[in-house]
Each structure stands twice: as structure tokens, then as C-alpha cells.
Amino acid sequence: MRIAFHTPLNAFEDGRISGDRRMARQIATALERLGHVVEPVRDARSYMKTSDPGLLERHRTQAVAKIEALAASWRAGAAPPDLWFTYHSYYKAPDLLGPAISEHLSIPYVVAEASGSERRAKGEWAQHVALARASFGAADLHLCFTERDRMGVEFWCGARTQFLAFPPFIALDADAPQPKPQPGPPRLVTVAMMRAGVKHESYLALARTLLQLADKPWTLTVIGDGPLRSEVEQAFAALPPGRVTWLGALAHDQVAAELASHDIFIWPGLGEAYGLVYLEAQAASLPVIAFASGGVPDTVKPDETAFLAPENDEAALALALSRLLADPALRARMSRAAAAFVRSERTLETASAILAQGFARIASARQRAMP
């Protein structure tokens, strides 16, 4: 099939580093592995940082113009898509194109990682939430990264909409660095941007957690950068000198190499949609320490590849880390389990198989609905 691939949150061609952008590229690759032709929808980003009504109206006007431009290109002889696929639609980046175009062309409309927000349904974001909900209900199929995502969208969908679990996955590199244990105390590593909001809050939680274990032997490597770097570094200033190494932002292959030379991945992950980095860490044979927050539990096997503490329970997070620090045999068992989990259950191949299953379902449903 010819698939129109729409990413309303971040432009597909945007090469900047983020888990969202990488996941979009991975899904496109999984679709191509099935033999489909993936055509990114260009110049169609609808992300809105603020709830400004004027900004929303401009996006809606631009969407109408984009729909007409695409329709004109098809009338002029360009090949229309056979299916519309939207990745990551929510109230700040609603899909303003897919429902209308899918109806116009009478083609299936598939959405991956849509998420609802009851908290924003009243007040300044209410109109944005309503638009997102309307698009949820237009879908033939929702591919849900987490159960939380499904619960946030299914109420707004009718009987014709199908749902399929589509767990987060990663494209494994055959040439990825192999684990390289280092001498000395256990080496912890974290990877995250340094920006306001839950990222900053997670860094603060991590600093306070590690301060509880300052008397234990460990080191921490921090990979990441951003506008709040000085504030983040200050949060760790109370730790003993020499415990923390700051590497800044690194390219993806450099991150993989660093992960492979560490022993434990720790990132509280407050409010994470899912956290691609948890899969990357496990692929590098690292056990994970995190909060059971957001979609994090959907990226690990609790008590097998990761220890998850209740959200915001820093004492429990410290206790979980202390357990791993004190037990090399436990670390080794969880290390092996982490690599096996990702390499058997969270790959491009498993993602492609789920996509094929979903497409078969909607094809069958549409055939049954024909007069």
C-alpha cells in the first residue's frame, strides 16, 4: 500500500534528537519492511506550545489549505494514499488532516500513540482536547503503546474503531557495542534532556535519591543537555566530589557505547509517555531503576529487568538501587533478562508483525461493512 505518514507533533524530516522523532522513523521502517511505500506528509506540524486561540485558528486554517493542496495534487494525477497513518496525536498536536482526508478518499485511518487528557478537557485547552477526541473517533484502528493510552481514547470511539496493543520497540543495531564491564564500583548512567517540567523534576528526584546513598560505592554518568543544565548540575552539588561525570548531549551511537560500559540505568521518569531510552538501556544489558510512572511499566518487565518504585517514592527508589548495588549476582541475572526481553519482544520484526495484524483486521472489517 501507499501510506501517508503524518507526524503532527514533530516534523518527520526534523533530524533533532528525541525519542519521539526516533520512534516515528522506526515505525516508518517497520511499515516499509512489510512492503508498503511510506510517504511522509510534509509541512503539516500542528504542535501548539500554548493554548492561544489565535494560534489554534491559524493551524486550522493551514490544515484546510493543506487538505485542498493535497486534493488538487491528486486531481492532477498524483497517486493518492491507500491508507492514512498518524503517529502521536494529542491535544497539543491534534490531527487536523487525517480524518477529513481519509473520509474524502474512503481509505482506512490508523493512529499510533494517541493520548487523551481528561485534566485538560475544561479550561483553556478545552477546544484543543475536543478536536483531538473527534479525531480519535474517526480512526479505524488505534495502535496503543500503553494501556493508559488506550483508556484515554477508547471512550471517544465507536464500535467500528479497533484497538491493538503496540508496545514500544527499538531498531536493534547488529553492530551495537557489546557490554564492557569496567573495574571499580558499580557505574550508573542516565540519559535525558535538561528542560523544564517533568524532566527537571526527574533530575531533582534522582539527585535526592542518590544523596540517600552517598555512603555506598557508585559513580554516575549523565548524558544530556538543555536550557536547565546549570540548575541540574547544582542539584547534584551536595554529592561527594568525583561521583558524577557530565558528558552533555551525544550522538545515538555514542550513547549506545556509553550504555554498554555501565552497570545500571537509572532515570526516575516522572510523567514519561513510555521512554525509548529504557528499551535502549535494556538492549545494552542494563537493569533499570525507575518510578512506575506514566508508560514506564510498559517498557520493562518489573522485577525481572527492572525495579520500579511507586511514583515520587524516593525512599523506595533508593532502596531498589541499594539492592542492586549490593548484589552483583542479581545485577548479572537482570542484565541477561533485560537483553533477552528487548531482543525477543521489542524489535522491528515484532512491530512489523503487529502492524500486519492490525491492517488485516481493518481490511476484514471494511470488507464486512461493504453492501
Image (cartoon, rainbow, N blue to C red):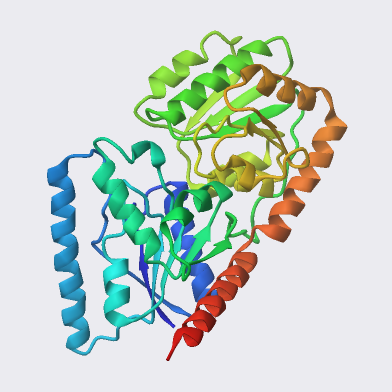
Q: Is residue 273 above or below residue 267?
A: below
Is the N terminus in the top left, top right, bottom left or bottom right quadrant? bottom left
Instruction: Give percent across and percent down for residue 343.
Output: 71, 57
- Above or below for 56 versus 158: above
Residue found at x 54% / y 33%: 269
Residue occupying the point 63% across, 61% down: 347
Number of disc labels: 0
Q: Is residue 227 left or right of residue 36?
A: left
From this view, report whether residue 332 is shown above or below residue 109. above
Residue 307 appears in the rendering:
yes
Residue 143 image position (x, y, % from top left): 51, 62
Is residue 98 left or right of 210 when viewed as pictured?
A: left
Residue 13 in view of the camera: no
Give the image location of residue 3, x and y in percent.
Answer: 40, 76
Foreground of the two, 28 or 137? 137
- Give whichever of 267, 138 is nearer the camera: 138
Q: Name the residue located 42 percent from the left edge and 32 percent from the top edge.
A: 225
**Residue 95 in picture, x, y percent from top left:** 31, 59
Q: Is residue 338 above or below residue 346?
A: above
